[in-house]
Structures are given as C-alpha cells and as structure tokens.
Amino acid sequence: MNPGLASAVQFAGSLPGSILLTLGQTLVVVCACFDMVRALSVPRSHRRYLANTVFRTLAPPAILFMAFSVLIDAARAAWPDVTAGMFVLVVVTYRWRTDSDEDSWWKGKGKALGRWFRTRAALPPVTAPAAA
C-alpha cells in the first residue's frame, strides 16, 4: 500500500478521523434528504426552491467527501463499503449534473457574482491633475 494511503487509513481510524468521517457522512445524508424533498415538492413552490438551493450547495462537498471515503475504503480493502460508497457517489453526482431545475438561488448567480467581482476588482479611474 502507498505510504500516503496508509497514513490516511490510520488517520481515518483515529478519533479525530472518525469524527470527520461521521460529519462527512451526515453531510451526504442531509444532501440526499434535500434531494428527496426537492423531487417530491411541487414545482415553483417555496419548499422546492429551498430544497433545491440546499441540495445544489451541499452536493459538491458531498461528492468530494464520498470520493475520499471510497478511496479510504478501497485502501482498507472493504469492498462492500466501496460498492455502497460508489453507488451513493454516482447517484448524487448524476442528480447534481443532470437535473436542471429553475427553482434555485444559484440560477443566474454566476453571472451576477462575476459582474460584482469585476466591478470591485476594477481599478478606479485615473484623472489627470489640473493644469495651472
């Protein structure tokens, strides 16, 4: 086994690692629950808007955590855990990438945040000193 993976497996078995893994699993479960609420809510309702916004916010960290968790399980050679983790990873990634929904706070915010950042990062106009 790679020494980096061995140290990651050893850290995952420690108390701080177990706490972090538990928090990450909680994040994944919350993400999946909000996806279920989003799927069962009426389109263009406030409940769907909130559920979709929370799901779209939590999906990237949940995907990263599940990828790390699957890597740790593979290094431990816990193949049933790898299979279950890959299933969850694929489902969350698929739902995040393919379900285009108009009910989200993030819809259109990329352009708005980019415009805001450009105006803040732009240099102030330079005026020439008055001639005497």
Image: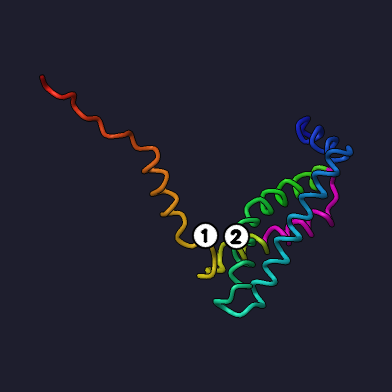
Would you say residue 93 sits in the magenta stretch?
no
Write the start and end of the magenta stretch as one range: 76-90
Would you say residue 88 sits in the magenta stretch?
yes
Instruction: Say whether residue 120 is left or right of residue 53.
Output: left
- What element does badge 2 sit on? helix
Residue at point 42%, 48% (across, down): 114
Coloring scheme of the render? rainbow
Is there a contact, CB below 8 Å, between mark 1 and mark 2? yes
Q: Quadrant of the N terminus?
A: top right
Instruction: Say whether residue 14 is left or right of residue 68.
Output: right
Q: Position of residue 40 (x, y in %)?
A: 67, 77
Query: Number of marks in the image?
Result: 2
Whether residue 81 is situated above or below residue 40 in the rendered picture: above
- The first of marks 1 and 2 along the sequence is 2
Structural distance between the alpha carbons of marks 1 and 2? 8 Å
Instruction: Say whether residue 2 is left or right of residue 63.
Output: right
Q: In the displayed orientation, state which residue is furthest to the left.
A: 132
Magenta highlight: main SS: helix
Q: Position of residue 4 (x, y in %)?
A: 75, 32
- What element does badge 1 sit on? loop
Q: Which residue is mark 1?
A: 106
Q: Which residue is mark 2?
A: 56
In the picture, the disc for residue 127 is: none
Q: Amino acid at mark 1?
A: Trp
Q: Position of residue 69 (x, y in %)?
A: 76, 48
Q: Which picture quadrant has residue 98?
A: bottom right
Q: Amino acid at mark 2?
A: Arg
Q: Which picture quadrant has residue 55?
A: bottom right
Residue at point 11%, 22% (across, down): 131
